[in-house]
Amino acid sequence: MMYAPVEFSEVDYPRVKYQRRQQFWNPIRLALFTLAIVAIIGIAIGIVTHFVVKDDKSFYYFASFKITNIKYKEKYGIRNSREFTERSHQIERMISRIFQHSSGKGRFIKSHVTKLSPDKNGVNVLMVLMFRYPSTDSAERIKKKVEMILYQSLKTKQLPLTINKPSFTLTSIDSKKMRNLLNSRCGIRMTSSNMLLPASSSTERIVQGRETAMEGEWPWQASLQLIGSGHQCGASLISNTWLLTAAHCFRKNKDPRQWIATFGTTITPPAMKRSVEKIILHEKYHKETNENDIALVQLTTQIKFSNVVQRVCLPDSSIKLPPKTSVFVTGFGSVIDDGPIQNKLRQARVETISTDVCNRTDVYDGLITPGMLCAGFMDGKVDACKGDSGGPLVYDNHDIWYLVGIVSWGQSCGLPKKPGVYTRVTQYRDWIASKTGI
């Protein structure tokens, strides 16, 4: 069964009446109650004072340096390439080890490489560093601490990569500049306070899933809506103008003038809304077999990236996820088969299932083709459902999120031995690039 688009319908919640009951206060009870209130207020003031004094603040720095014991590769210039990803992670791990053990417990938060460029003696690295220090500290004082820690490590530690010390520069930046730098990196989730949101924060079909915890948790999620009919499908933002979704979402209507895309954790009200310029369906989409169930949607005006709206990374075509890899599916779809869609975005953790298992006679009996990916659990319960179609299945790699699947089809929702079936994004990287240049 295809996860069909559905119309938005509000859910009515019963009103519960509570009886009021008069309380009898005698003088002793009143005195004890007053003392208790005074004690609670005293404790609260103490706690607030403690946290105001001890309040930490985020500090951001832009670092630039040269690594001299590796040679530059052409694919380092492509941020979504396997070469850039692997080298960036190696640099980030090394920087993390330097500061996690030297800057005080919990002071170092994260580092992110934003660019690798060629140098005649190796590779130039540009990266963002994030720290938490007391708000009474100054950015300049912390900068000196950071430089001292790094220089000491270069002297005393055996590091896998050789940093040229004279080339190292550190510049204090504000949160807006930091966000702009990170916007060059896809798949990054930020809280409203410009703190990175680690993968561990998202532990829960979005049947048996949970409502998304906060804005910015899944900032690439979009809702595709037919004007006058409401939410039909999910989609994923892959650039400032392109969405990736499922071809079957447009079976009834392919006219871009009839569609809009909204962003944010709720359909109503949306955080952002855009009109649709163009819809591109895969030329070999077959609705009978669900093969090549993939489509691109171009927006009429560009998206300005923020903590709430951000693009997801497209995986390198060579990436292969082993069975039982944890992945997340998100959407506004129903939580029971044939139920109404949800106004609040929901999420669920599922696991990849091998094609061999999914093609067993007691599962999907050979219907899974190379362009499809199964994810869920063999005992059912957690699954995508109607209205989630076209939405993202994402995989976390060092707190960078990659779009590995598009919600496509499945037999009912959450049944045993009937996991969700997704369009395998790695299989269509060349097709996406040929249409968008991404």
Image (cartoon, helix red, strand yellow):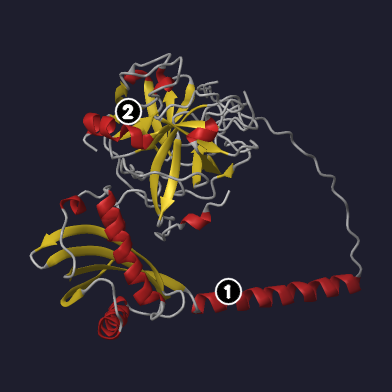
Residue 224 higher or lower than 63, as above or below: above
Mark 2 lies on a secondary structure that is strand
- The percent coordinates of residue 362 (x first, y second) are 61, 27
Q: Nearer the viewer, residue 383 or 90?
A: 90
Q: Is residue 87 above or below residue 409?
A: below
- Residue 296 has which mark? 2
Number of residues whose C-alpha sits closer than 10 Å to that of mark 2, classed few (under 14), some (14–19) or many (20 or more): many
Q: Is residue 434 left or right of residue 95?
A: left
**Residue 84's x, y, as percent?**
25, 54
Q: Which mark is residue 48?
A: 1
Q: Is residue 126 left or right of residue 253?
A: left
Relative to residue 197, is residue 414 drawn left or right?
right
Quadrant of the rendering where the N terminus is positioned:
top right
Q: How far across and how far down the image is residue 290, in percent?
A: 44, 21
Q: Is residue 353 above or below residue 116?
A: above
Q: Quadrant of residue 66?
A: bottom left
